[in-house]
Amino acid sequence: MKIVVLGAGAVGLTVAAKLSRVADVHAVARKRHADAVRERGLQMTGIWGEGAYRFSCSEDLPRAWQNADYYIVTAKSTDTEAICRQFADAIRGREVASLQNGIGNEEIIARFTDRVIGGMIITGFEWRGDASVHVSVEAAPMKLGRFPSGMDDAVGLLTDLIRKSGIRAEATTEIRTDLWGKTLYNCALNPLGALMNVPYGALADPHAWTIVTAIVREAYRVAEAEGVALPWETPEAYLEHLRTTQLPATAAHHSSMLQDLSRGRKTEIDFMNGAVAALARKHGLDAPYNTCIAEMIRLRERL
C-alpha cells in the first residue's frame, strides 16, 4: 500500500510516521523538516508513543510516488487549493483524504478529484523543533467517511490501515456531520485560546464561557440553515459535552491558532468562525460573536 501525505506539517508528519510502520509512505514537507526526517527521522513524543520514525520525505513528489493508493492532505486550510493545484496531475481520479481543520476543504479537493474522503481529527500536535512533534491530547478517535456522506471499501481499507498503525480511527457514513462537530469545537476554543494566550482548560472560566456559549449557539443556527444535522440535538447538549468531555481531555493544549500567530503565519480563521459568519450572511442570519472573533484574529495577523 502506497500513501502520500501532502502538505505535511506537524499533523501530516506525525500521521505519516505512524503509517510508515504498516505501509509505504512518502511525505511532502518543508525543506527543513524533510532534511531532518532524512537525517535522523521524525522525532515523536507524547501520547502516540515516543521514538524516531524514518520514511520517505522531500519537498516534492517523486515520479515513483505519483501513483499512490491514497493521498492525504494535511496542509493548513489556507493552502488547500494551492496544494491541489500543485499536485493536480497526481491526485486526479485518485482517493484523496482531508485531515484538516474547518469546513470547506473537501469542497475544494472535489474540484480536482471525484474520490474525496473527509477526515475528522481532534488531537493536539505541538512542534518541538524541526521534524520533532509532541502529541499532547486526543479528544476523540479519528473519523473517516466518503464526502459528503456514505461508506465504501476504499474508506474502510484506509480506516483499517490507520487503526493498524496505532491511531484510534472509526469509519462513518455521515462525515459532514462529524466535520461540523469538530468545527464547533474549533470555533469555540481555538481563536479565544489564541487571543487570550491560554490553554483550553482556562476557557472554562465563566467570563470566557459566556463567549463560547454565544459562538456555539450561532454556529448551530447556521448549521441548521445549511441542512447539517449535528451529533448533539441542541447547543446546550453540545456545550455540556464540551464542558464535561472535550475540554477536560484537551485542557493542557494550546491553540494551533496561537502557534500560528506566534510564528507570524496566517491562521485558519476563514475556515472556522469566519466560515460560520460567511454562511450566516448567506442565509440572512446574524452571527455577531463569530464575526467579532474572526475580525479580532485577522487584526492579530496584521500586527
Image (tube, rainbow, N blue to C red):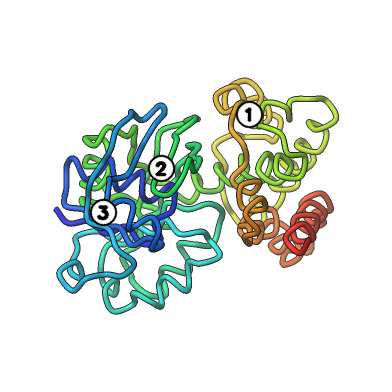
Q: Position of residue 237 (x, y in %)?
A: 66, 28
> The residue under label 2 is which amino acid type?
Ser
Residue that appears at 62% across and 44% down: 186
Which quarter of the image is occupied by the C terminus?
bottom right
Label 3 belongs to which residue?
Answer: 38
Q: Is 15 rendered above or below residue 87?
A: above
Q: Nearer the viewer, mark 1 or mark 3?
A: 3
**Disc 1/disc 2 C-alpha distance (Å):** 29 Å
> The residue under label 3 is which amino acid type?
Arg
Which tag, 1 or 3, sits closer to the chain's start?
A: 3
Q: Is 12 rendered above or below residue 52?
A: below
Q: Is residue 122 left or right of residue 265?
A: left
Q: Position of residue 229 (x, y in %)?
A: 56, 45
Between 242 and 269, the one lying in front of the other is: 269
Q: Is residue 217 left or right of residue 183?
A: right
Q: Is residue 252 left or right of residue 287?
A: left
* Tag 3 secondary structure: helix
**Disc 3/disc 2 C-alpha distance (Å):** 13 Å
> The residue under label 1 is which amino acid type?
Leu
Q: Quadrant of residue 71?
A: bottom left
Label 2 belongs to which residue?
Answer: 132
Between 247 and 65, the one lying in front of the other is: 65
Residue that appears at 29% across and 75% down: 92
Between 268 and 260, the one lying in front of the other is: 260
Cβ atoms under marks 1 and 2 closer than 8 Å: no
Tag shown at residue 242: 1
The residue carrying pointer 3 sits among few (fewer than 14), some (14 to 19) or many (20 or more) residues within 10 Å by Cα, namely some
Which tag, 1 or 2, sits closer to the chain's start?
A: 2
* Tag 2 secondary structure: strand
Which tag, 3 or 2, sits closer to the chain's start?
A: 3
Residue that appears at 33% across and 41% down: 171
**Disc 1/disc 3 C-alpha distance (Å):** 40 Å
